[in-house]
Amino acid sequence: MKGLVNSVAYADGLRIGEVAIPDISEVLKQPGRFVWVGLHEPDDEMLAEIQQEFSLHDLAVEDAVDRSTGGIDYGETHVFVGSNYVVSVRHGGSLPYVEVRSRCEASPDLLVKGPGFVLYALMDFIVDQYFPLVDTFEDKLAALEDNIFRQTLTRETTERIYQLKRDLLEVKRGVAPLVDICNRLVRADVALIPDDARVYFRDVYDHTIRINEMVDTLRELLTTALEANLSLISVSQNDAMKRLAGWAAIIAVPTMIAGIYGMNFKFMPELDWPFGYPLTMTVMVGACAFLYYKFKRSGWL
Amino acid sequence: MKGLVNSVAYADGLRIGEVAIPDISEVLKQPGRFVWVGLHEPDDEMLAEIQQEFSLHDLAVEDAVDRSTGGIDYGETHVFVGSNYVVSVRHGGSLPYVEVRSRCEASPDLLVKGPGFVLYALMDFIVDQYFPLVDTFEDKLAALEDNIFRQTLTRETTERIYQLKRDLLEVKRGVAPLVDICNRLVRADVALIPDDARVYFRDVYDHTIRINEMVDTLRELLTTALEANLSLISVSQNDAMKRLAGWAAIIAVPTMIAGIYGMNFKFMPELDWPFGYPLTMTVMVGACAFLYYKFKRSGWL
Amino acid sequence: MKGLVNSVAYADGLRIGEVAIPDISEVLKQPGRFVWVGLHEPDDEMLAEIQQEFSLHDLAVEDAVDRSTGGIDYGETHVFVGSNYVVSVRHGGSLPYVEVRSRCEASPDLLVKGPGFVLYALMDFIVDQYFPLVDTFEDKLAALEDNIFRQTLTRETTERIYQLKRDLLEVKRGVAPLVDICNRLVRADVALIPDDARVYFRDVYDHTIRINEMVDTLRELLTTALEANLSLISVSQNDAMKRLAGWAAIIAVPTMIAGIYGMNFKFMPELDWPFGYPLTMTVMVGACAFLYYKFKRSGWL
Amino acid sequence: MKGLVNSVAYADGLRIGEVAIPDISEVLKQPGRFVWVGLHEPDDEMLAEIQQEFSLHDLAVEDAVDRSTGGIDYGETHVFVGSNYVVSVRHGGSLPYVEVRSRCEASPDLLVKGPGFVLYALMDFIVDQYFPLVDTFEDKLAALEDNIFRQTLTRETTERIYQLKRDLLEVKRGVAPLVDICNRLVRADVALIPDDARVYFRDVYDHTIRINEMVDTLRELLTTALEANLSLISVSQNDAMKRLAGWAAIIAVPTMIAGIYGMNFKFMPELDWPFGYPLTMTVMVGACAFLYYKFKRSGWL
Amino acid sequence: MKGLVNSVAYADGLRIGEVAIPDISEVLKQPGRFVWVGLHEPDDEMLAEIQQEFSLHDLAVEDAVDRSTGGIDYGETHVFVGSNYVVSVRHGGSLPYVEVRSRCEASPDLLVKGPGFVLYALMDFIVDQYFPLVDTFEDKLAALEDNIFRQTLTRETTERIYQLKRDLLEVKRGVAPLVDICNRLVRADVALIPDDARVYFRDVYDHTIRINEMVDTLRELLTTALEANLSLISVSQNDAMKRLAGWAAIIAVPTMIAGIYGMNFKFMPELDWPFGYPLTMTVMVGACAFLYYKFKRSGWL
């Protein structure tokens, strides 16, 4: 049986003390008390006992067990809240909630509001973790923009745009249920949230909306960045082709002239001229110089 | 008359026994009982008898007959639920519901809730089949990404992106009605779902929403992957063009020089120099080396 | 005065007999009767008389006259329904409603429900015409996919994708008002639809939703197909460029060597070697073979 | 003080006579009368007096003054409606409303419904002006399609697609507020619209929805047309490259052969053959013909 | 303690006088008075005192402190409104609200409506700042269009399209919460907005909606502009390739002919013809002229 982080009973906003798991159902019978249990990747045995002690619904616990694992792991948390208990089940790489607990215990005037406030504190903590994450994404996008518009085009730029979009969509999928839950907590008649606590969830809700908007803005910018990147690749291809064409012409002209005077006709008067060779060379160089000047002026070279 | 899988009567959450189809209408008259009939691709005769026994509506049965067949077949199921009966009509390649039935029979405390619970069990089973399917899609996408960003560009990559998107949209079209139905079952006043069973449909609803989100994320990633693929094709074309241009220049320069000394002018002093030939060869090799070095440094070769 | 298809009075679900247009207002005064008039591209005179006999609203009739004509013509139908009449005005190339009428008359138990049921029968008929149409589109898309991924790239492929999308959007515009109307008929308190008939419109509604989803899926696939097509064009361009570059190199190398030995230097020892020529030819062929092998291995040829 | 088009009082659906602006407030005091004032680009002085006479709200008048001017000018109209007055303020290039007034005056049975009906007549007039406009856009798109799929690719095609999209979005922005207003007039409890007049606004609403759908269809088609255009440009580039490659090869081969027999080796037996030259020429022509045939067959030329 | 701009008490729509911050809580106790405090980037000490004097909620003040800083700074404002106070906290580069205050004080008949009207005045001021901003964007887009369709293609065009889109999305994110807030103020039962003031917020709401639509139109146009730009880059590449191919052919043909007459066959009768050389030159020039004419006519040169 592993996975227990801590299990504490509270009354009147104050910490009473640790509670052993088998004693929880006893404590829950006492009025004015609530129990807050923190779990981290509990095994099945632990979950089964927790379910029994808190009389949790089968369906809820089931979802807390089988969790998807993929791509970047922003962690996943399941919270069970009742009128006199809070159980948080944390999975993966998210930050531990010890800090939330100590912050809650530091403000008894708020903790006295009960499990609803603890739920708020947990959600606020989870949501606030997304802000620095999205900030990182904005920095990455800024670096990508510099790559796209200032530096040479590489295959990596495209891949990094793609990866950033992938990560963003992962974040969006992480935030989506939070928006949904906050919305339900703010509007619906959830008995366990006292009316004066609703403003807290409104605050979390606004934060999730804001993260969602930031993510959407980034998404649209990334899509545009990918298209801008493609445009610049084409521009660069255009430039390469023009340069290729320009130099090809500059080399082809003297080659053609040389070919002409390499013909073996018996009667080619120029071949006998004393200055035929230097004249031809001058013409060649002149033609090349002229072409170079023309191409340079029209921006092909 | 073919297509019957099984037909069983239940009372108080327990299996009473098999019921012959002509006896169904009799059993339905007994209070506290319900009949659960499973059909698999029934013929018209069977459907007609089932309709008569259960007094099903014409429209409902009609839709269960004419079913579209196309692309990938994720199967299709029609369920008729009444206060004392459940009829499931399964088509195509989906998994049989025998497993659902045995799981239901194994938990009489839930089965006692009646046809509403059976409906939940069926829907839960159908929805849960989509998770491994979507996981397969995620694996395929990961393989595609490797193809796009690591390996050579082939026509197959594009085709596979397209096919994956096609399959995804097929899944989306399969899930869409489930979302709709769950939503109606959770919210509307459907008499046949007791209030304490609504939480079960809420669970199925959340699962369908989650599949939908997974599918949407994959869809957007595939769109981005297709664009990234196009970008990389252009980058690769760019590289090819630069290499082409570079080698063309390296070969064109000595060809031009050779052409010049192939001219037949009478007075070309270099031709008479003893070291004219090796000197010219040195110049040629030097020019080529210089160009090679320049192109190499600017990344064209 | 032209455009009348038929005009029949019904009572208790049974056909009483044809009614001359001027007698309609008389028949409508009799309780328990309703009149069903079918028109096909009526002239203004006919419409005016129909309006008078049924006391139709100016606005409704006006819209039934001026109809847009464009692109593909899936026909257009206006239906006026009252508590004791149904008037259908059909335009363009849609199928005639004679079949609907005979089907309705064949089931008096349903026809007894009155004009509401006739409205359902008409809408069901119209909506069901879209299924084979969308199926045709799916076949066309399958053919297009084969074109894109299997065969040579032609300008026609792009045009056919565009045309298919155009036709699809035409269908969408045709279905959109049906979805809207069904939705209103199912939900709102439209007095003329008895409650037990609402299930029929729910069925039509579900069909329109399904067509809409099929159209949307096709639309998204077509967008993806267009992008995939562009990718493949670029891949094909890439291949062409590589082949061009490869053959250019293979031909350029012997040309360069030949140029060198075509120079007229006095002192070129190789020119006097007895095996100079065959040796040079061997080198040329060897260089070409080497290049060919290299390009072949790297997939450029 | 300029901008007055006309100012007329009505009672019982009939025109009573023109009203001087300073007398308006007097007329408004008489029961059963309403005043309809038409303005065209009034100056500030005029607007101020109108505001005073009708006691209009500051905010409303303010918006009617500062109007945006940009791109194509489809005109802009502000309408103030009260229980006994209608004031229309027309800006820009839209058609004058004299026609609306005469049509209204021609049907006293409708005009008796008061300012609500005048509002309908104005809106119907404005909305119906969009239909020919959208028709023009459809013709332009058809011409563009012909350009894209039938004719040579020019820079203008792209620009025209862009311009058409720009104009369409302008129309959309013009229609959007109309949809919004109609929707409010149909649903909300706007006291000034009698219930039997609501059907008229429903009709205008349906028209705005229809225009909106037409605009959206055109928008999507234009997006697709732009992509199809890009595809065809790429196809055309592909063709050009293949033709370039083909001719390059056809010319390069005889050049290479000629280069070989231009070498100055002492011992080249072919040079002394009597038929060396015609044989070589035959080989050259044969090689070119063979290449031409091959390229022609594979569609490169 | 820094950041105070001004702090004034009002009664009956008239300015009573400045209030020192520590006296605010006293003034708030007097009925019929309200205090309007303007802050600009206050330090934590100031905010703490303000919070205490007005008994503001912790959450609200917290959000007003930590503000994101990024990209272009359109400023950010937090407003706290109660039944008898308004506190505005301005950050960043937005215009100061002194003007709003003087405008409010100039119309005591409106100011008498209390804090609700001040809130309107502030929001109206903020929203109206967006109109010139969006106008600037429209001018920038017009300049970009000129760049895309009239001038040479440069890398900067793509970058400027991207930057404009980035800025637009920034504006959208700035306007989004305003739309949300106005919507809530117009619809919900916010006690502090008297019913006759709701029309003012309706006006602000309409303005935000209008800005939103302008931004969306610009966004879609920018997306189209980016695609059009890509198309034109491809067209331009196409032109470059055709010109390259054309000139390559014109130079390659005489080079080939020269090569042929550069062969050293003993028996080449043309070489001995007196007019062999001028004839060959004529053929060369003729071939070039013919090719030039052909390419010119087909638009390749």
Image: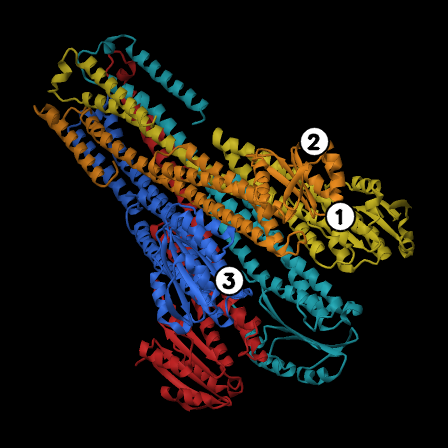
Chain colours: A orange, B yellow, C cyan, D red, E blue
B187 or E233: nearer the viewer = B187
Q: Is residue E245 left or right of residue B279?
A: right
The residue at 41%/22% (across/down) is C292
Residue C299 is drawn in which quadrant? Answer: top left
Task: Give the numbered dot on residue B120.
Answer: 1
Query: B300 above or below C95?
Result: above
Q: Quadrant of the C terminus of chain B?
A: top left
Q: Nearer the viewer, residue E224 or A43?
A: A43
Query: Looking at the image, which residue is at 68% across and 65% down?
Result: C186
How many numbered marks appear?
3
Residue on which the image places disc 2: A43
Label 3: which secondary element: helix
Kindly state the secondary structure of the residue where label 2 is placed: loop
Location of residue E103 in the rendering, given as x and y in whole percent from the top left corner? 35, 67
In front: label 1 or label 2: 2
Q: Residue C38: give x, y in percent of width and height.
A: 66, 73
Q: Is residue C128 visible?
A: no
Q: Residues within 10 Å of mark 1 (few under 14, many from 20)?
A: many
Q: Chain of mark 2?
A: A
At label 3, the amino acid type is Asn
Q: Is residue A112 visible?
A: yes
